[in-house]
Amino acid sequence: GAGKGTLLEKVRAQRQDLGLTVSATTRAPRPGEIDGQAYHFMSQTQFDEHLRKGDFLEWARVHGHCYATLKSEVDACLAKGQSVILEIDVQGALQVKERIPEAVLIFIEPPSLEVLAQRLRNRHTEAEKDIELRLANASKELSLADKYDARIVNDDLATAARELASCIRRYEAGDTTAAAT
Ligand code: 5GP
């Protein structure tokens, strides 16, 4: 709801060299979402089997469903020499940082919780009870934002996309002080 997906779409349109990973999830596909493109949609049993085999770089339960980054997806991008961007929740991001300390965490935040509520309602993809759950999670996530390397407020999409693109470039260039607040 902070606009991670839309922001990344914008940045990726200009940066086709950025590595794209497809996450695993146990949530049901939304209309129009294609398996293997939006996500690798799977049953809880399949998800648990991957988890048992150690196939995930990180995983988390978000809004009542399981989500995970497959190591194989990240490795495929790295093998091509690409920078990899993971669009994941806070719990997952902190696991990645633990395993890969050189990973850079960029927190995308909504201008306010009121704006976030409005965006989620306008999106019409979730039922009201799911929206309430997502809003409660958002407050929790915001309280962990200080563990991130950089923060970008997604107020105006074009401005935030420019900030994100330049933040990524600075980190790629090795500027570890590349804050974007
Ligand atoms: P949605 O169901 O709206 O596609 O995603 C819900 C939340 O799950 C979003 O905050 C999204 O960033 C997060 N998410 C998506 N993929 C992953 C993943 O692979 N790992 C983790 N930890 N979170 C993910």
Image (cartoon, rainbow, N blue to C red):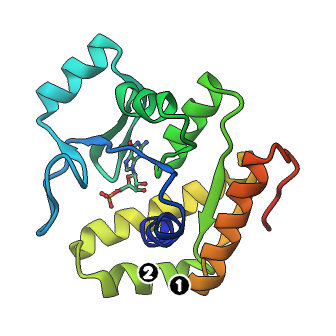
- Counting the numbered discs, the total is 2
The residue wearing badge 2 is 117
Q: Residues within 10 Å of mark 2 (few under 14, many from 20)?
A: some
Q: Amino acid at mark 1?
A: Glu
Label 2: which secondary element: helix
Q: Amino acid at mark 2?
A: Ala
Image quadrant assignment for residue 33 = bottom left
Residues at discs 2 and 1 in contact (Cβ within 8 Å): yes
Percent x, y of residue 73: 37, 33
Percent x, y of residue 166: 72, 65
Image quadrant assignment for residue 30 = bottom left
Horizontal arrangement in the rendering, residue 79 relative to residue 130 (left or right): right
Q: Please tell me whether residue 32 is drawn above or below residue 70 in the rendered image.
A: below
Percent x, y of residue 37: 23, 52
Q: Please tell me whether residue 56 is drawn above or below residue 133 in the rendered image.
A: above
Q: Residues within 10 Å of mark 1 (few under 14, many from 20)?
A: few
Q: Between 95 and 129, which is closer to the camera in this rendering? A: 95
The span from disc 2 to disc 1 (Cα, nearest Å) is 5 Å
Residue shown at the point (66%, 75%) measured from the top left? 162
The residue wearing badge 1 is 114
Q: Please tell me whether residue 99 is drawn above or below residue 131 in the rendered image.
A: above
Residue shown at the point (56%, 41%) measured from the top left? 93
Horizontal arrangement in the rendering, residue 77 relative to residue 154 (left or right): left
Q: Please tell me whether residue 49 is drawn above or below residue 23 in the rendered image.
A: above
Q: Between 131 and 79, which is closer to the camera in this rendering? A: 79
Percent x, y of residue 137: 47, 58
Residue shown at the point (19%, 49%) measured from the top left? 27
